[in-house]
């Protein structure tokens, strides 16, 4: 048995000379069509098994709007089916692109998400109405602690410190905010206290993770449990007996922004929120800009990618890491203020309910990028709000299932359905100087 | 800039890495620091660069005593370092890497990337480096990355440049280019410290040579000195630089690889349809710049690569698709390229490391229990036989020097009944004395009638051991040539070019 030996010319084969070798992203391009296909089929099956007659009303405006958009009333069943067809078409386009080895443009999943969600909603809310503004506006509000937490996570990890303690920072932030706002009578003082509390948790994390090289994941988890126990203890021993003086803060009130708030649909969703939400917009922009465009950001990223290299050009690695995670902790802590100063006006035990871990998922889902992590957190916020809205209108979907929704989205997101994501190279690795 | 080091001493615990070293480097000269791995050259330079603090002694630049607390101070004083492991951030662009730590900024700490790009272009043009400031570093070939390191140093107005083992990762062509760059820098009046253990390079560019052994300066050598003289100064005794070996006694074609193709986890084709054979009693050496499929080739033979197609037969038995243990049991000895990661368990003792690939049955295991006595006797014997310098067989592998660690790996692999030996980078980071010993063992294995596959990025080693040389480039065979092929030809082939008049040698 003899096979001809392949003539070894350097130019043949898959590798072209003098170009950067790009990975064949076979797995990455296959994922999208499969996901879209499965979702489309799932929706079709739901429609087939329990079709609904009746009409669905999508209400786009709220009463106080300057320009009143009319309600959209559609027949539930046919609309849902039309959306299934559109979803199917988008899936087909995605499959075509996969077979032709083309890139999957971002508009496909976005268009799909809109069509699929419209179809799902017109089925789920048959003979009822969907307040689009409160569905989306509520999503933004619910996402606030997630976005703050995710930004804290992104910053920490970009500097090379895994910030598992987001949950603890949120919870201690909520706790401190309640006390500070109650004693001073100002929610702004509460917000500052929340930031300080978050930074305090970060300081402990830094002490163990940076200075004493303790495993960062373990320290982070331990801190979360510690803050949980601490706040539970103080809540029972201190806050409950003195609820009037220590645990009755003034809330942040809604503060509609003139002009911007009057834009139809967008205004009520984005610009008739509490000051905390507006602060969030600013923080997102500032963090994204600072991370990519400033000296500070360049150094933070350098320290998270290759600390030794940063050290050899005179950057103090551990000092940079400390500063960054203190800032990260402060940002995450501000997210905690949402719970006790916006959501309700008091601190309750365990009131963050694992949001810190979802924020952590948003960090990974968002590929360690502040803008993408924000979008991921918004998605999780939407899933949470959708669950609330649907159970409120009494949809046919069991509420237990809806309660799973945000976590399902999280699992799928983190399982890598979004393509390859690469963490900062030195993420979680302590830097030891000789 | 004139550098004077006076009586530098640096201790790590009880180990004296630098013992009262004194050294003078004049502007416009290339001063070579020659010494074996572990002689203390890098420690000395890290002291100079402010990464370590000296226990005794002083650093003087242009007559002024310096007190560096970190690399930042050293850089500010005009010292630039081209590190052995590049201190570049792979995901940053060239401009970002060059400006890091020395950023020019606009309003509110806003990065002035244009200024950084201009600076890179200016220096790159002045020395003919051809480096694009927008390129992302991880996409660049190693030789170009090194130039980025040089630009980084020059952009900070360095007057003294330290090159720490700069040629370890370069092709012969890139090495020649680097030598030119160093001469150019010298002409521009820079003082250059060139750290290396490669004799050929020293003799090519050095104006002065200082030899360091066991942390002490053993003396200055003349750049005209012969290789043998330099080597014996470095090691402290006469060294056989040429491997003594008789002509091979060739047996039949014992090891046959056909159309082997290996695709890595990221989907890259790393070995691209290669075919070759090795006869019993023959050494086939694989030459090539690191990252051209050598690692994947050896791992595919061992069954360590998942996506392997084609055929690998040893004495007629197919190895592709077999588990690693089956491959080991069919008589393949494997010296992996990174002994720290794949060759040893650092936290295990020498004795435990010696039984790693025979942990299932006799002689070291009976009825699922270790036979400690047999193991200890075996380890004791190998310790003497392979001249492993360690306190005893219970010393942890992590505490051995590179050369002694490698001897443990070699002892383990060669003490089984072998049908094939695969040796990947068998002497990387190993002292000259141990290199000599390991090379002798490889040749002895060949002479006992076993086919041997040696993979090395060191051309010296390839030429020393090979009966035939196979050059790999981007996962393909450029050619299989006789061992006496000129270095220039081999160097050219390593860049993927196949000389037109070249003839492959059959087995």
Image (cartoon, coloured by chain):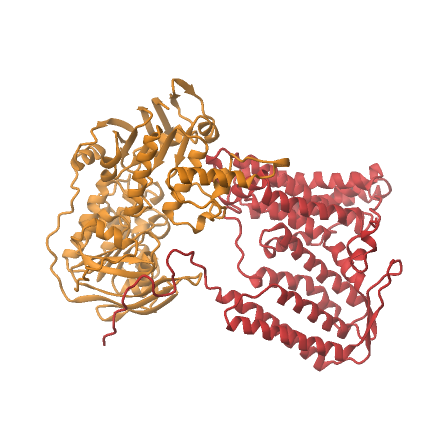
Q: Position of residue A112 (x, y in %)?
A: 66, 69
Q: Quadrant of residue A266?
A: bottom right
Q: Residue at x 41, y 62 (%)?
A: B268
The correct choice, above or below, for A287 with respect to B454 in the image is above
Residue A403 versus residue B345 in the image, above or below: below
* Residue A211 screen position, x and y as percent: 54, 36
Question: In this orientation, does residue A276 appear?
Answer: yes
In the image: residue A39, left or right of residue B323? right
Q: Is residue A337 above or below residue A36?
A: above
Residue B282 lies, in percent from the top left, at: 17, 59
Give coordinates of residue A257: x percent, y percent.
Answer: 82, 49
Look at the picture and state if B91 lies above or below A313.
below
Whether residue B257 sits left or right of residue A240 in the image: it is: left
The quadrant the N terminus of chain A occupies is: bottom left
- State the residue in front, A366 or A16: A16
* Chain letter, orange in picture: B
Which quarter of the picture shows residue B54? top left
User: In the rendered image, which quarter contains the C terminus of chain A?
Assistant: top left
Q: Is residue B429 visible?
A: no
Name the residue: 54% across, 71% down: A97
Q: Quadrant of residue B415?
A: bottom left
Number of marks in the image?
0
Q: Residue at x 32, y 31 (%)?
A: B186
| Chain in red colour | A
């Amino acid at each position: 048995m003899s096979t001809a030996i392949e003539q070894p010319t350097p130019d043949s084969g898959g590798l072209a000379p003098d170009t950067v070798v790009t990975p064949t992203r076979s797995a990455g391009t296959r994922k999208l069509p499969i996901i879209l296909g499965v979702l489309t089929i799932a929706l079709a099956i739901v429609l087939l098994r329990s079709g609904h007659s009746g009409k669905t009303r999508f209400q786009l405006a709220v009463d106080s709007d300057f320009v009143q958009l009319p309600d959209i009333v559609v027949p539930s069943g046919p609309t849902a089916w039309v959306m299934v067809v559109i979803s199917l078409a988008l899936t087909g386009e995605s499959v075509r692109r996969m077979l032709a080895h083309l890139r999957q443009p971002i508009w496909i999943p976005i268009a799909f998400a809109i069509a699929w969600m419209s179809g799902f909603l017109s089925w789920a809310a048959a003979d009822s109405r969907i307040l689009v503004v409160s569905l989306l506006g509520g999503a933004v509000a619910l996402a606030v602690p997630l976005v703050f937490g995710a930004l804290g996570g992104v910053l920490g990890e970009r500097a090379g410190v895994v910030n598992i303690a987001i949950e603890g920072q949120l919870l201690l932030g909520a706790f401190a905010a309640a006390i500070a706002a109650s004693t001073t009578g100002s929610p702004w003082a509460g917000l500052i206290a929340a930031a300080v509390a978050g930074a305090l948790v970060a300081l402990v994390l830094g002490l163990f993770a940076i200075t004493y090289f303790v495993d960062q994941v373990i320290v982070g988890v331990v801190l979360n449990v510690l803050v949980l126990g601490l706040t539970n203890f103080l809540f029972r021993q201190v806050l409950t007996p003195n609820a009037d003086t220590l645990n009755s803060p003034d809330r942040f009130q809604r503060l509609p922004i003139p002009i911007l708030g009057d834009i139809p649909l967008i205004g009520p969703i984005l610009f008739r929120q509490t000051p905390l939400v507006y602060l969030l917009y600013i923080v997102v922009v500032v963090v994204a800009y600072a991370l990519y465009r400033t000296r500070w950001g360049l150094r933070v990223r350098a320290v998270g990618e290759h600390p030794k290299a940063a050290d050899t050009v005179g950057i103090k690695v551990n000092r940079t890491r400390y500063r960054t995670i203190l800032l990260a902790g402060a940002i995450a802590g501000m997210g905690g203020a949402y719970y006790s100063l916006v959501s309700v006006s008091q601190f309750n035990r365990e009131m963050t309910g694992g949001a810190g871990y979802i924020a952590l998922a948003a960090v990974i889902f968002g590929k360690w990028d502040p803008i993408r992590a924000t979008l991921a957190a918004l998605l999780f916020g939407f899933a949470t709000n959708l669950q609330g809205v649907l159970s409120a209108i009494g949809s046919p979907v069991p509420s237990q299932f809806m309660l799973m929704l945000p976590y399902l989205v999280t699992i799928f997101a983190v399982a890598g359905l979004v393509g390859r994501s690469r963490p900062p190279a030195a993420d979680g690795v302590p830097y030891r100087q000789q | 800039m004139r550098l004077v080091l006076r009586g530098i001493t640096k201790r790590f615990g009880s180990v004296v890495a630098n013992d009262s070293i004194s050294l003078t480097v004049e502007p416009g000269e290339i001063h070579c620091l020659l010494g074996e791995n572990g002689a203390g050259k890098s420690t000395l330079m890290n002291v100079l660069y402010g990464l370590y603090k000296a226990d005794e002694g002083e650093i003087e630049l242009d007559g002024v005593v310096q007190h560096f607390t970190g690399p930042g101070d050293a850089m500010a004083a005009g010292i630039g370092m081209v590190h052995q492991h590049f201190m570049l951030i792979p995901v940053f662009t060239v401009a970002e890497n060059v400006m890091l730590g020395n950023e020019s900024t606009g309003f509110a700490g806003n990065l002035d990337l244009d200024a950084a790009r201009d600076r890179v272009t200016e220096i790159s043009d002045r020395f003919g480096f051809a480096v694009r400031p927008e390129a992302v570093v991880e996409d660049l070939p190693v030789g170009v990355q090194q130039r980025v390191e040089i630009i980084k140093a020059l952009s900070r107005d360095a007057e003294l440049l330290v090159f720490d083992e700069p040629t370890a990762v370069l092709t012969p062509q890139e090495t020649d280019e680097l030598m030119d760059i160093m001469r150019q820098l010298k002409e521009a009046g820079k003082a250059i410290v060139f750290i290396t253990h490669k004799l050929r390079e020293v003799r090519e560019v050095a104006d002065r040579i200082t030899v360091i052994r066991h942390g002490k300066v053993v003396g200055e050598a003349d750049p005209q000195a012969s290789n043998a003289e330099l080597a014996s100064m470095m090691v402290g005794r006469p060294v056989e630089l040429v491997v003594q070996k008789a002509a091979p006694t060739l047996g039949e074609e014992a090891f046959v690889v056909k159309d082997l193709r290996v695709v890595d986890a990221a989907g890259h084709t790393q070995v691209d349809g290669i075919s070759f054979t090795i006869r019993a009693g023959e050494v086939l050496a694989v030459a090539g710049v690191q990252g051209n499929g050598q690692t994947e080739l050896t791992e595919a033979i061992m069954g360590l690569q998942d996506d392997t197609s084609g055929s690998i037969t040893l004495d007629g038995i197919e190895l592709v698709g077999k588990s690693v243990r089956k491959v080991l049991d069919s008589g393949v000895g494997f010296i992996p390229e990174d002994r720290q990661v794949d060759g040893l368990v650092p936290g295990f003792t020498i004795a435990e490391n010696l039984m790693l690939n025979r942990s299932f049955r006799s002689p070291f295991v009976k009825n699922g229990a270790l036979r400690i006595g047999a193991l200890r006797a075996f380890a004791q014997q190998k310790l003497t036989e392979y001249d492993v310098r360690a306190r005893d067989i219970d010393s942890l592998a992590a505490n051995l020097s590179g050369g002694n660690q490698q001897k443990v790996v070699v002892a383990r692999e060669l003490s089984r009944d072998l049908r094939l030996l695969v040796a990947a980078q068998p002497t990387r980071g190993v002292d000259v004395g141990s290199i000599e010993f390991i090379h002798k063992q490889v040749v002895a294995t060949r002479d006992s009638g076993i086919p041997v596959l040696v993979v090395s990025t060191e051309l010296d080693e390839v030429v020393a051991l090979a009966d035939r040389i196979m050059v790999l480039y981007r996962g393909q065979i450029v050619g299989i040539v006789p061992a006496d092929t000129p270095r220039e030809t081999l160097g050219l082939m390593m860049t993927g070019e196949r000389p037109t008049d070249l003839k492959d040698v059959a087995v």
